[in-house]
Amino acid sequence: MLIRTTRTLSTWAMRALFYAALFGVVVLAHMAIGGVLRAQGWGSGAALFAAGAAVLVLVIVAANAAEWIRDRLRERREMQRVQQRLPSGPCCVVWRAPEEEKSVRQLIEQDEDDHTDMPWDIVGPLRARYPRLARRLGVEGIAIAEFEVGADGRAKNINCVDAWPSDVFYEAAREALLHAKFQPKDVHVRFGASYKMPFVFRISGASKARDAGRRARTLRPTLVAAQQAVENLRQQGGSQR
């Protein structure tokens, strides 16, 4: 089963939205405070200066509060990442070299064809949630769940066969199987058999590139000779010490 999601807003996008909202608040606050002061009999210049000072204080307080909240959220997110054993940065499910021909979609279809002998059909769509923190960090994952189907058509005895890079993807797969409903393809169904179902969690646009960056070029012979000479001098200096 393939679970797709999209990237969340980046840090730059969040900051842009914050400063845009702050700009709107500053304009409205400046107009409101200036209007109140002029209504109290203040002159235009004095009201403008006082409103500007009040808005400056408001901006400083809001910026410091936002920075404090950002630090607390970052610490909380880091604690959750460690608890869930997620990598610290983006992680793709499959690394495809340029010479490979099969896509991840073809591999998933091949896995599904291998399990067509399962005498059960899923009633309705099988929905799985993408782990929130993994999506925020740009982490993709795989989970393979083994389960049995009871007489009521519900999955039971769900076990984790494999999960990478964290067990949170298995928890999402397990939750999806617990909410799934199965119906037999045939009247004669054998209970007690176990089945395996793969779950692939992908972020749209995260791992479609066939190659990351350019390949390193071979050094010229003169540069290779110079590099070897430098290495020999370093070794001689180390041996003399």
Image (cartoon, rainbow, N blue to C red):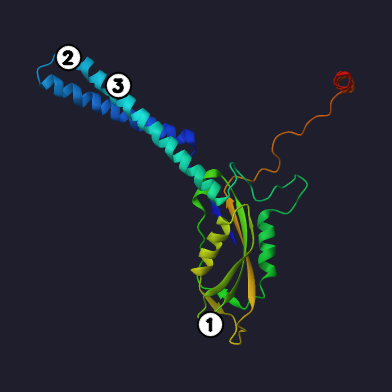
What's under tag 1, amino acid-wise? Ala
Q: Is residue 148 visible?
A: yes
- Location of mark 2 (residue): 44
Quadrant occupied by the C terminus: top right
Q: Which comes sooner in the sequence, label 3 or label 2?
A: 2
Measured as percent of width and height from the top left, residue 113 is found at: 68, 68
Left or right, 6 with respect to 61, comes to right
Judge by depth and name the residue closer to the eye, 169 or 216.
Answer: 169
Q: Which numbered mark, 2 or 1, is in the foreground of this view? A: 1
Estimate how packed mark 1 is, as few (under 14), some (14 to 19) or many (20 or more) residues with alpha carbons within 10 Å: few
Evaluate if marks 1 and 3 touch, with contact meaning CB atoms under 8 Å apart. Answer: no
Q: Which residue occupies the extreme bottom position in the image?
A: 188
> Residues at badges 2 and 1 in contact (C-beta under 8 Å)?
no
Q: Which residue of the protein is positioned furthest toward the front in this rendering?
A: 241
Choose the circle earlier in sequence order: 2 or 1: 2
Crowd band around label 2 with a 10 angstrom C-alpha radius: few (<14), some (14–19), many (20+): few
Disc 1 target residue: 151
